[in-house]
Amino acid sequence: MTATGLAVASPAQAQGLAGIDVSNYQGSINWTSVKNSGIQFAYIKATEGTTFRDARFNTNYPAAHAAGVIRGAYHFARPNSSTGAAQANFFASNGGAWSADGLTLPGALDLEAPPSGAACYGLSTTSMRNWITDFYNTYKSRTGRDVVIYTTASWWNTCTGSWTGMASKSPLWIAHWGVSAPSLPAGWNNTTWTFWQYTSTGSVSGISGNVDRNYFNGSASRLLALANNT
């Protein structure tokens, strides 16, 4: 266990605590049913860029908490639209802040290709590194927590130039579907993943249709420690 809350275990470990991530696309969610189905944590979309607020965040976030699901908020990065600091402040002011209540995970920064347009948002690898650092520093200043980074190995290595500079600071939420063990971005292969989104077509009681499923790479006590920053 490191100071940043990274759960250390073999990346080949194919299972862990069950979790999901959701946005307005999942529609109405019965969080009591979600909790009773064995889901222990959830990341919930809060913001995107500096103007978009997820329409269901203000319902999902407190409802997950009330059901006893350890929850965290995530921000979809738009590095071409404004500075990392501006987006970190928007996120922290619109659901991404952290509270030491035993049920709140540090916020997550979703770094992936946009639905359309250039995968790296037209930024050079140096500019992308600077943008991420700007976001990280601002978020930590606002919340006292290291932001979790959600990404894929291919996006990270391409768009940051295989940068290793965040691995000692940010827990990794890796997306890699349909494999027995995820490929890790540069830097984190010397530690491991903390969260793994292993499918986008999962199903959970209380949610209609597909939902992203995730593992936490550690025990329930380690998940609670990450939530509590201990």
Image: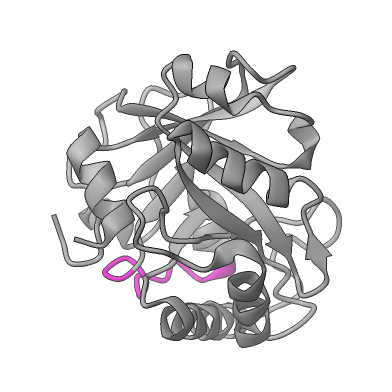
Q: Which residue is depicted at the point 70% across and 55% down? A: 113
The colour scheme of the drawn protein is one colour
Q: Is residue 179 left or right of residue 125?
A: left
Quadrant where the N terminus lies? Answer: bottom left
Q: Which residue is depicted at the point 70% across and 44% down? A: 59
Instruction: Residue at the far right: name it.
Output: 116
Report the span colored magenta.
159-169
Total marks placed: 0
Quadrant where the C terminus lies? Answer: bottom left
Q: Residue 140: x, y in percent?
A: 42, 79
72 or 192, which is in the foreground? Answer: 72
Q: Is residue 127 left or right of residue 12?
A: right
Name the magenta segment's main secondary structure.
loop
Q: Is residue 188 magenta?
A: no
**In the image, is residue 32 above or below residue 136?**
above
Q: Quadrant of residue 25?
A: top right
Q: Residue 143: x, y in percent?
A: 43, 76
**In the image, is residue 122 above or below residue 54?**
below
Q: Which residue is depicted at the point 78% across and 41% down? A: 24
Q: Residue 173: x, y in percent?
A: 44, 49
Q: Is residue 223 left or right of residue 86?
A: left
Q: Residue 156: x, y in percent?
A: 52, 60
Q: Quadrant of residue 199?
A: top right
**In the image, is residue 122 above or below residue 32?**
below
Q: Is residue 129 left or right of residue 145?
A: right
**In the image, is residue 167 above or below residue 90?**
above
Q: Is residue 162 magenta?
A: yes
Q: Which residue is depicted at the point 77% across and 56% down? A: 114
